[in-house]
Image (spheres, coloured by chain):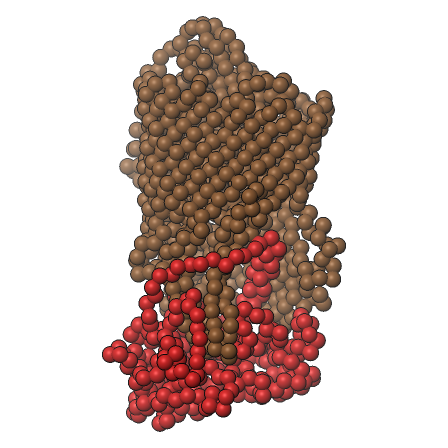
Chain colours: A red, B brown
Amino acid sequence: MRYKKIIYDVMLLSTIIFGLYSCSKEIQIDLGEYEKKIVIEGYIENGEYPWCVLTYNQDYFGEINISMDDLSKLSDIFIMDATVIVSDGFIDDTLEFEMDPLVLQGKFIWPPVHYKGSKIIGETGRSYSLKVVYKDEEYTATTSIPSLYDIDTCWFQLDPMAQNDSLGSIWTVIRDNPNEVNYYRYYTKRVGRDNYYAPGQMSIWDDRFFNGKDFEFVLFRGRSLEIDYGAEDPESGYFKLGDTVSIKACTMDRDTFWFWYTLGNQQTLSNIQGGALGVWCGYGATYKTLLCKLNEEI
Amino acid sequence: MRRLLIALLFLWLLGGALLASAQTIFSIKGTVRDADTKETLIGANVYLKESLNGMSTDINGRFEIKERQGYYILACSFIGYIEFEQAISLNKDLTIDIDLNPSSFMGETVEIVGGRVDQNVRSAEVGLIELPMKRIERLPVLFGEPDILKTIQLLPGIQSGGEGSNSFYVRGGGADQNLILLDDATVYNPSHLFGFFSVFNSDIVNSADILKAGIPAEYGGRMSSVLNITAKEGDLQNYRADIGVGLISARAKIEGFIQKDKSSFILAGRRTYVDVFLKPFSKGTNFEGVGYYFYDLNGKLSFHLSEKDHVFVGGYYGKDVFNFQQKDDVMGVHMYWNNAFASVRWVHFFKPDFYLNTSVIFTDYKFAIDANESVFDMRLFSGVQDWTAKSHLVWQSNTLNKVKMGMDYIFHTFTPSSAMANSNEVGFDLGDPQKMYAHDFSTFIQHEWDPLSWLKILYGVRYNYFAQVGPFTRYQIDDIYNMNNIDSTLYGRESIVSDYHTVDPRINMRFQLDRTKSIKTSYTLNHQSVNLAAMSTSTLPMDVWFPSTELVKPQKSHQFSLGYFQNFMNNTIETSVEAYYKLMDNLIEFQTGANVANALKTNYDWLFTYGKGNSYGIEFFINKTAGKFTGWIGYTLSWTTRNFDDIMNGKTFYARFDRRHDVSILLSYKLNDQWDFSAVWVFASGNASTIPAAFYFMEGRIITEWGDYNAWRMPNYHRLDLSANWNLFEKKHVSGSLNFSVYNTYNRKNPYYISYRASGNLSERKLQISAYQVSIFPIVPSIAFNMKIR
């Protein structure tokens, strides 16, 4: 929601103002031992095979070093020998562990390894269950793929707030269905520049405040994983004139929404049973491609 | 209800019987005034030196002492004034009006800076501390602004909300559990500038009393403390003006008589001017559209209509404004919050020792934020508005008995968070702004009684009736996350939605061991029906005041307190050790994971969860109140915990303001009439804080897995502040002084919050998170110029 962005901006401004006086120094915090948990990030999307990555939670201040050449180091983060089964109620699809083909081509992709199905293809209106068995522990979840949302129209618009005069945002008109509760999320990918779809800042919302209404909505670009976490994104949240952008608009069910919505809070609401972190996420996804050009509308 | 009435009647009859049985003695009565301005002085100490029998002057500057026939020295002292002494022969009732001379004009040697000289050991109230403004004015200040709330935080048992913050926590109670009164009007948000300054202009504050335990029955509605601030009256003899110019603000005060000796006015105002100064420098920068200021205005009219009737009309208006406007109007934010009150108080004396104090007060607190960005605009607002009527009857028949009884009524109108938003003129459906109305009625009776020479008892009872009334819509929701309304009940105007009857007994007992030693104990039960739903650690104006409802039961606390008090060196050094234990119930917190935005379309109280708390500790206090060298040392050792079924599955956790050790040392030295110096050193154990336990990846992003609630301690806090006051000149009609202050003299980097930053990135397959302690105020020197015109 856009008003959240404004509140965020106000908070940021207040921080800047107090920041004029403030200073910071690095401190050491001893967190002690942490409870090791497994993290499930699983997706099923209409027209796609189910897909899942299993990781461990990590020592907060520990150093992460991922070596694609040394599988023993990779296993500090990724679980590569679990049994992952997705079922649509009729067919069980046991997902196979594999390295992402892009990694094999020498390109960057996250995650570099995953489990992928080969029997079930996601369909709207259906429910899917997930079962992960690892070291005698079993984790289960259920999700569904709701009906799709078609991106009606979108266009690129330069943003005078941007530092560079060729940067801008993509706008769209949300046309919400008044007859159902809708949960939305969007991702964007710059064709030829990104290898993955990234979720934009505040990309998740439900229709409780605009049920059945049509209104203009801005899509921010998600942060690239190639940029250092501590560094500023030179095109901070904007698209560039000339970018070709693929927009992925997703609908999801209530439990999936609440996971993404509360992710990182004191208590994240997960739909996974058995004590694992993460989500089993069903997406109804539609795609649209836009060339970032002035006066171009699709 | 019937039982309660019987109990009240019994108390009343008991008081009457005691009055009737009192001995025949003579009285000395009168009024204490400033010799120069004829302004009555509240809280001046009047006593007979031989018997130490005496009292503090009341809100009308009056006193009445009753004593057996004999020869005595009548003494009177008050901070900033020369001590008064007069030999009297008490063989009939006497009326003696005392005019005290301000000390600065006489070059005296001994100055009293505390309250009543033996108040520490003689009063019945176990947790009462009086702070005269003249003592506060000398202390070091941040940005040149004397601040009463910052001084209060230096007392044992009272903790600061954080660096520079004005919020305070008393004996483990929340920031909303303090009843803050300015001339009887409730102040809902005592802060300017995001909590760094208080709304109390030092120019207009006459005195401040804080009660942290043993709160008498005359006060109600808050569980932890009462901070009672009285504003000055205007000069009845002359016209005066004060001007103060500090680093970030300027202030002015004028006062004088309307009709000499009969009526007066006082008007004071302040405004910050950082925005004005920064404008030329910010032109063309990213901060060009940023502006912040606050201002406040205080006024009071006093009419002494006759010996029997006095009328006071007071008012306050203060506002904070934050503006940000991006070039070309692409984005703008306008945020403000304001406090306002207007009051009329009438004091009628039936007899000198029997008077009625009646007031009608209107209070208004509002917060709003307007923001626009491109095609989008929104408004968020909240507030509370009160109409209050109070009538208190005071009867002091002799020194052994004082009875107070009265009634308070408040009509509250709460506006919990409401919002409106549009995108290109398409309105979002954020629910209708909800207002909540409540009747808040209380009646009390209290009796202060000296049945034996060594025993003093202050006891009483307060009955409260709190009713939320319509118009109101009560929604039933599906669950606390979705918050979809599944059913609703409509309540019409004035129909009762929910109501609560509560009875609060209070008792204070003082056992006098000898003239300089006493033991005091108290028990109080307090109920609180207005609550602050605090989302933030500072007193950010986004916090919302909320009444007791069907779901929100009145908060309740039992407090037991026991203290040993001893004075030394002719009552000039006061010491005390106090232990307390406090149990709290029906405390409110936000549900974990509940979303405030989702409550906009339903009832806000679905967001809360309810729990218990307890706090216990011991406080040590040494206070030197007289001489060139004054000051205090306070130390508190305490524990404060909370327990909520819905937070961490009912596991007990430390409150955020749980503070194991808290030390304040305050020293003032008056070198001569030109110079005085002060130093303040504070030490506090680190605040309890929630920190990460681990992290995990989700879509390649770092997600924090948080540890237990408030399970970690921030680094300790300590700071030294210094100040010097230089009286530059003092002539018949004009005087001027400079205040030099240094905040955080040794530039300690105290923790304000902890931030976490990651370095590296996943494409390079390296990643490391580090913790940073953010500090906000380094060493801050300041200078302020003050001028008085008479």
Q: Quadrant of residue A289?
A: bottom right
Give the total of numbered labels: 0
Asked whether, in this view, residue B455 is left or right of residue B780, the answer is left
Asked whether, in this view, residue B355 is left or right of residue B522, the answer is right
Q: Position of residue B206 (x, y in %)?
A: 56, 31
Q: Position of residue B48 (x, y in %)?
A: 45, 14
Q: Residue furthest bottom?
A: A119
Compare residues A257 and A222 and report the one nearer the observer.
A222
Q: Residue at image x 51%, y 75%?
A: B761
Compare residues B56 and B763 and report the one nearer the observer.
B763
Q: Residue at image x 59%, y 56%?
A: A19
Q: Quadrant of the C terminus of chain A?
A: bottom right
Q: Position of residue B39 (x, y in %)?
A: 60, 24
Q: Quadrant of residue A282?
A: bottom left
Q: Residue furthest front?
A: A70
In the rendered view, would you say B153 is above or below A131? above
Compare residues A13 and A127 and report the one nearer the observer.
A13
Question: Does residue A33 appear in this view?
Answer: yes
Q: Residue at image x 38%, y 51%?
A: B655
In the rendered view, would you say A271 is above or below B441? below
Q: Position of residue A136 (x, y in %)?
A: 24, 79
Question: Does residue B584 appear in this view?
Answer: no
Q: Residue at image x 72%, y 50%?
A: B277
Compare residues A72 and B265 and report the one nearer the observer.
A72
In the rendered view, would you say B445 is above or below A274? above
